[in-house]
Image (spheres, grey):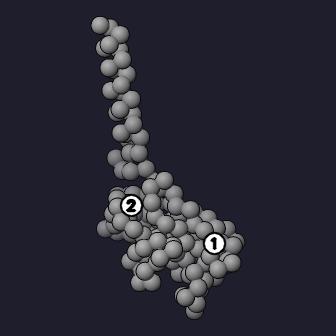
């Protein structure tokens, strides 16, 4: 009987640990999701975008290697990198020297993960038609 109780208790604890894993105990929010950003059009601009739910909104941090010092517009678009809707859903702070941090007020990580969205970075403000990096938003 004690073996059954011990096994049952261990199973329950394991289930709670599994369910609590993606949630931060301190804030009660989902764990950050890291998106792989892949270079496009020969840019060499690979990197990551990290999406973190905060009390202020969804924080999006883009970090790219081999990026120029000049501003590169970035957005969240409906679709995937392979089939991107050209109309942005949410503007992000331009990437400068490979870095950008934006807080999207009123947007949740759950909203983006439950839909089909991608983050893309444009070559420059004068060349929005050339994409230099893109990453599909999906749970890791």
The image shows residue 97 at horizontal and vertical percentages of 64, 74
Q: x and y percent of residue 78 in the render?
A: 40, 75
Residue drawn at point x = 69 percent, y = 73 percent: 44
Kindly check if marks 1 and 2 are in contact, taking CB atoms under 8 A apart as contact: no
Q: Quick one: which residue is furthest to the front in this view?
A: 82
Question: Label 1 vs label 2: CA separation?
Answer: 22 Å
For disc 2, the marked residue is 113
Which disc number belongs to residue 65?
none
For mark 2, give the secondary structure: helix
Query: Where is residue 101 drawn, in percent x and y?
Result: 51, 68
Residue drawn at x 51%, y 74% as measured from the top left: 82
The vertical placement of 51 against 72, above or below, is: above
The answer to which quarter of the image holds residue 66 is bottom right
All told, the count of numbered labels is 2
Q: Position of residue 65 (x, y in %)?
A: 67, 68
Tell me the quarter of the picture where residue 58 sits. bottom left
- Looking at the image, can residue 101 be seen? no
Front residue of 106 and 42: 42
Q: Residue at x 55, y 88 (%)?
A: 129
Quadrant of image for the N terminus: top left
User: Which is more toward the observer, 46 or 93?
Assistant: 46
Query: Is there any visible trace of residue 138 in the rendered image?
Result: yes
Residue bearing mark 1: 39
Residue visible at 55% across and 72% down?
Answer: 134
How many residues crowd around disc 1 within 10 Å: few (fewer than 14), some, or many (20 or more)?
many
**73 in relation to 119, above or below:** below
Q: Name the N-terminal-most of marks 1 and 2.
A: 1
Label 1 secondary element: strand
Residue toward you, 30 or 135: 135
Residue at the limit of the structure toward the bottom, as seen here: 126
């Amino acid at each position: 009987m004690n073996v059954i109780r011990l096994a049952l208790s261990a199973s329950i604890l394991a289930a709670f640990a599994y369910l609590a894993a993606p949630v931060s105990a301190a804030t009660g929010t989902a764990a950050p999701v890291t998106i792989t950003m892949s270079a496009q059009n020969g840019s060499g601009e690979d990197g990551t975008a990290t999406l973190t739910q905060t009390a202020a909104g969804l924080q999006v941090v883009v970090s790219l290697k081999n990026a120029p010092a000049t501003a590169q517009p970035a957005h969240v678009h409906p679709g995937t990198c392979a089939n991107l809707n050209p109309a942005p859903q949410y503007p992000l702070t331009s990437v400068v020297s490979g870095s950008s941090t934006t807080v999207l007020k009123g947007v949740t990580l759950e909203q983006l993960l439950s839909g089909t969205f991608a983050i893309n970075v444009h070559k420059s403000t004068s060349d929005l038609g050339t994409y230099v990096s893109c990453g599909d938003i999906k749970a890791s």
